[in-house]
Amino acid sequence: MHEEVVPYLGFDPMAKQSFSPIFSSLINSRCFFVVEVEGAVKGFYRATRHEGRASHTAYLGTLAVAPEEKGSGLATRMVAEAIEDLKQQGVLRVELMLEADNPRALAFYTKLGFVHEGTLRAAYKRSNQAHYTDELLLAKLLKPLPRASDA
Ligand SMILES: CC(C)(COP(=O)(O)OP(=O)(O)OC[C@H]1O[C@@H](n2cnc3c(N)ncnc32)[C@H](O)[C@@H]1OP(=O)(O)O)[C@@H](O)C(=O)NCCC(=O)NCCS
């Protein structure tokens, strides 16, 4: 709920009590990971697998580092580790959604090889804003994959 982090996550700021069931469901999903530095939580992300014909694809979400860790390289290590884990599980494509007004995160993911594949118009709305925000679909292929359009 930190003011530098919460604008880019999926929920509006709320009291701990209200967030508790959401947090429990995140934990129970067994898809939520935290990174600790000297015993303190300094980063987190959620990694989920798609199913069926998209099972080679994983989705990264709810990703952030503590404000004091911005620019420290922790986020780069965290995403590299997440991608390596997913790769070990056979994932070939990693995708994520990013708010169009988050240039820092866009620069971050671009640096890590994610590509902007499309825009979901007005897909996101913060309760303290009158306007809707576009979301960018970013993805990274973990190795070159044959596509019909290449033929
Ligand atoms: C997104 C996040 C994980 C990136 O981690 P980070 O430690 O800040 O990332 P880095 O500092 O390694 O990289 C950010 C890049 O953006 C650049 N940058 C910084 N501020 C910027 C701005 N206002 N506009 C554009 N680029 C900016 C940096 O210079 C850096 O690029 P460089 O390494 O080439 O210099 C972190 O900022 C964060 O937790 N943000 C809040 C939550 C969030 O936005 N999550 C993503 C939602 S999907």
Image (cartoon, grey):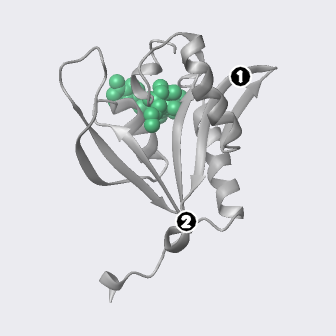
Q: Residue at x 54, y 16 (%)?
A: 18
Extreme-bottom residue of the structure: 151
Label 1 Cα crowd, 10 Å radius (few <14 / some 14-19 / many 20+) = few
Identity, as a three-letter code, of the amino acid under mark 1: Val
Residue 34: percent from left, percent from top: 69, 32
Using the numbered discs, state the Cα–Cα distance from disc 1 to disc 2 in whole angstroms: 30 Å
- The quadrant where ligand 1 appears is top left
In the depicted view, which residue is nearer to us: 71 or 128? 128
Disc number for residue 17: none
Q: 106 above or below 17?
A: below
Residue behind mark 2: 51
Extreme-left residue of the structure: 131
Is 107 displayed left or right of 25 in the figure?
left
Q: Residue at x 56, y 19 (%)?
A: 19
Is 146 displayed left or right of 69 in the figure?
left
Residue behind mark 1: 41
Label 2 Cα crowd, 10 Å radius (few <14 / some 14-19 / many 20+) = few
Is label 1 within 8 A of ligand 1 (CB to nearest ligand atom)?
A: no
What SS does tag 1 mark? strand
Q: Residue at x 41, y 20 (%)?
A: 12
Is 72 displayed left or right of 147 in the figure?
right
In the depicted view, which residue is nearer to us: 51 or 118? 51
Residue 71: percent from left, percent from top: 53, 25
